[in-house]
Image (tube, grey):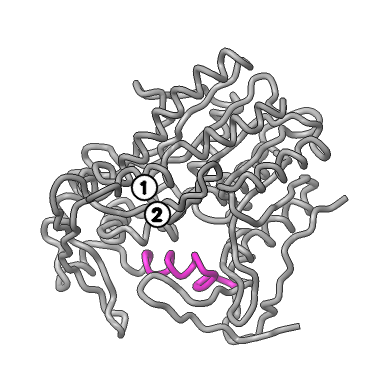
Amino acid sequence: MSEHVIAPKSRGFLFLDSHPEGCRQLVDEMWQAVPAPVAAGGEGPVALVIGSSAGYGLAATIAGLARVGIRGIGVCFEKAPARRTGTAGWYRTAATARLARQYGRDMVFLNGDAFSDTMKEQVADLLAERFGGRLDYLIYSVAAPRRTDPDTGRLHTSVLKPIGSPHTTKTLVFDEYGAPEVKEITAAPAEGDDIEQTVAVMGGTDWERWITFLADRSLLADGFTTAALSYIGSPLTAALYRQGTIGAAKSHLEATARRLDERLGTMLGGRAVTSVNAAAVTQSSTAVPGIALYVGLLRGILGDAMVAPIGQLVELWDQLTGARPLDLDDEGRIRLDTWELDPAVQHAVAERWSTATSDTITELADLDWFGDEVRRLYGFRVPGVDYTAAVETDVPWPAPTS
C-alpha cells in the first residue's frame, strides 16, 4: 500500500503527478455522459483502439464500450507508479477496465509501444485466441513524439514547425502565480528532413502497417471498418498546425485512408476513413502554441455548446456502426468539427483573437474553464473528490478477466 495526499504541481501545462481517484471519477463522468446503448443482439463487435488511454482515444474506448457494447483490446503506453505517481493514462485505464467489467464488456488493455511489431504480434495472438479470430473495428488515435521504424530500426522524431518561413503567433501562458499572459512567439521553419521525420511518426505509415499485419493473419472480419482520428482546426492556427509539419503528417494520414479504403473495399467489403474531430483540451493539444489561447476563446464564445470529445466519439461510433448515416465530406472524411468551423463562430473567434492581450484575455476567454480542463487531464479539479485525503497510488494494471 502507498497512500499519499497528492497536490497538483506543474511546469506550464504539464503536471508532474496524477490523482488516481480524480482520474477514476473523470472516467465515470465520461461513461455516464454516453446515451443509452444502441440496441444489438448477442455479443458486441470486436474492436481494437490504438491510443486508448487519453484524449480522443480514451473517448473512443469509453463511447465504444458504453454505446456499442464493444469487446476487444485497447493499446496505450503509460508509466506505472514508482517514485512519482503513475501517469494519468495509467489510472484512467484502470478505471475504464473496472467499468468494462462492471457492465460485462470483455476488454483487455495492453501497455507498450504501439509502433512495434512485438505489440502487433501480441494483439494478433489475443484476437485469435480470445476474440474468435475476427476484428470488426480498428480506431487509430496515436499522438507521439517519436517512432522507431520496425524495418530499419531508425528512430524518427516529430517536430511542430511551420513550412517555408518563420511564423509568429499569439499564445497563452500562465506566470508562476497563475496569472494569464498573452505573448507572441516566433517558430522557425522546418529544415532538413523535419517534414519527412514528422510524417514518419504522425502520418499513416503505422496505421497501414497495423491493417496489413492483421490482414496477413486473416484477422479482419468481412465489412471490417477502420477510422484514424485527425484534426484540421481554425485558420488562426493553420500556419503552425494544418499547414505545418503536423499538417503534412495529417495529409499523409488522409491519403493513407483513401488507399486503405480502396483496398479494404475490394478485399472485405470494408472501409477506411479519417474522422476530423473538433477542438478540445487534451494533453497533446496543450503542447501546440496558440491552441490554448484559441480553445479558451472558443469556449468564451460557445460555452456549453462546445461538444466534448465523448460526445463527438458517440457520433463517430453511431456513423461507423450504421446507427446514423455515414456523413462524409468531398475528401471522404467524417466531419465532427462543423460546429467549430461554422463561419460565424470562426469570425467571432478571430475578432477576439485580434484584440486579445494580457489585459483583456480574462474578458474574452473562459480561462476558468480552460484551467479546470487542463487539471482534469491529470485527475484534479474533479467534483466530488476530497483532495485533502490520502489516496492509494499503487493501482495495478488491469489484468484480463477469464
- Which three-letter amino acid code belongs to the residue tagged 2? Thr
Choose top left, top right, bottom left or bottom right for residue 391: bottom right
Q: Where does the image place residue 348, in percent across and percent down from the top left?
A: 19, 48
In magenta, the rendered stretch is 369-384
Quadrant for the N terminus, please. bottom right
Nearer to the camera, 9 or 114: 114
Is 217 left or right of 227, judged from the image as shown? right
- Which three-letter amino acid code belongs to the residue tagged 1? Gln
Residue 274 painted magenta? no
Residue ID at (57%, 20%): 264
Q: Where does the image place residue 257, in percent across and percent down from the top left?
A: 46, 28
Mark 1 or mark 2: name the one nearer the start of the chain. Answer: 2
Is 204 left or right of 337, judged from the image as shown? right
Question: Which residue lies under the disc numbered 2?
Answer: 157
Residue ID at (16%, 45%): 164
Residue 197 is tagged as 1
Q: Where does the image place residue 325, in percent across and percent down from the top left?
A: 51, 22
Question: Up-down: is 283 above or below 194?
Answer: below
* Proximity of marks 1 and 2: CB atoms separated by less than 8 Å: yes
Residue 380 painted magenta? yes
Nearer to the camera, 334 or 254: 254
The residue at the far front in this view is 152
Nearer to the camera, 263 or 95: 263
Question: Up-down: is 150 above or below 271?
Answer: below
